[in-house]
Image (spheres, rainbow, N blue to C red):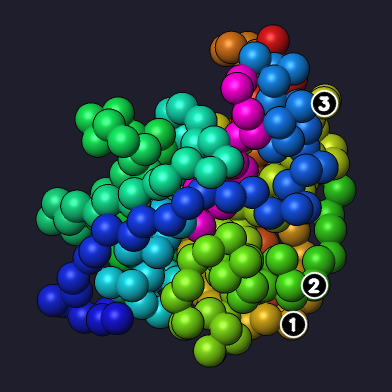
Amino acid sequence: MTGGSFATFATFTIHAANLPEHARNPIHTDAGAQAAGFPRALVAGVTTYAYLTHPIVDGWGMGWLRSGTAEVRFRSPVFDGDLLDCVPELDGDILRVDAVVGDRTRPRAVVMASRDGAAPPQMRAGEQLRDRTILLDGELGAEYGERAGDDLALYTGSGVVHPAVWPALANLVVHADVARGAWVHTRSLIRHHGIARVGAQATVSAVVVERFDAHGERAILDVRVEVDGVVVATLEHEAIVALP
């Protein structure tokens, strides 16, 4: 792995798989997915994102985890068991990573990542949701990617929280406070503002800033994650919270 100016990026290939805890959203089970018109269980968007971060962290290392950004958009489902290629391409300062199943001209999801950091943005006005205090450990620590199949040793070796934990925390908020029944994560803009260590207590704050209809009822949330009073991640998080 290299984090310098001459970083190299390699395609990461894996059989996509759901983690057991994702069954709490019916769309990640065969029965729930089929009820919504899909052939089999959809892989959680946050797991697909975990796979997509592999080439980024392999190339840019701890620097990106500390202050980088990524916007992920989910274009079409990745299904449980799909053979997934995470294909990176650097264009200037932007690293694009496509999630590809077979046809490389039609990626299932796309990440646009940058090493350039920014100060945490202000939370926008909207429907304030309850704050949560969450222990960053287990599925919400260094183990997330390893259990999903992201085999980079950086997280468990250094005790650093996996970057997929940030959208996973936003998904917990959506599932508990916003969604009605099966729901689908569609997009996230994730900004890193600092390193979080496994075992820390995080405070998660969230605001629903917009609701609208587009192939179902959608919600956009601002989410902020703090550890010891310091903001470590902020997100703009979008999901279809009620399927049509």
| In this rendering, position of residue 26 left or right of residue 82 | right
Residue 33 falls in which quadrant of the image? top right
Mark 1 touches mark 2? (CB < 8 Å): yes
Q: Earlier in the sequence, mark 1 or mark 2?
A: 2
Depicted 243 relative to depicted 195: above or below? above
- Disc 1 to disc 2, how far (Cα)? 6 Å
Q: Earlier in the sequence, mark 3 or mark 2?
A: 2
- Give SS at disc 3: loop
Residue 222 lies, in percent from the top left, at 63, 44
- Give SS at disc 2: strand
Depicted 170 relative to depicted 78: above or below? below
Q: Which disc, if any, is residue 199?
A: 1
Residue 234 lies, in percent from the top left, at 57, 56
Q: Given the image, on which type of amino acid does mark 1 rest?
A: Gly
Residue 90 lies in the magenta-colored region: no
Q: Which disc, if any, is residue 188?
A: none
- Disc 1 to disc 3, how far (Cα)? 31 Å
At horizontal 65% and vertical 33% (from top left) the residue drawn is: 41
- Give SS at disc 1: loop
Q: Given the image, on which type of amino acid does mark 2 rest?
A: Leu
Q: Given the image, on which type of amino acid does mark 3 rest?
A: Gly
Q: Earlier in the sequence, mark 1 or mark 3?
A: 3
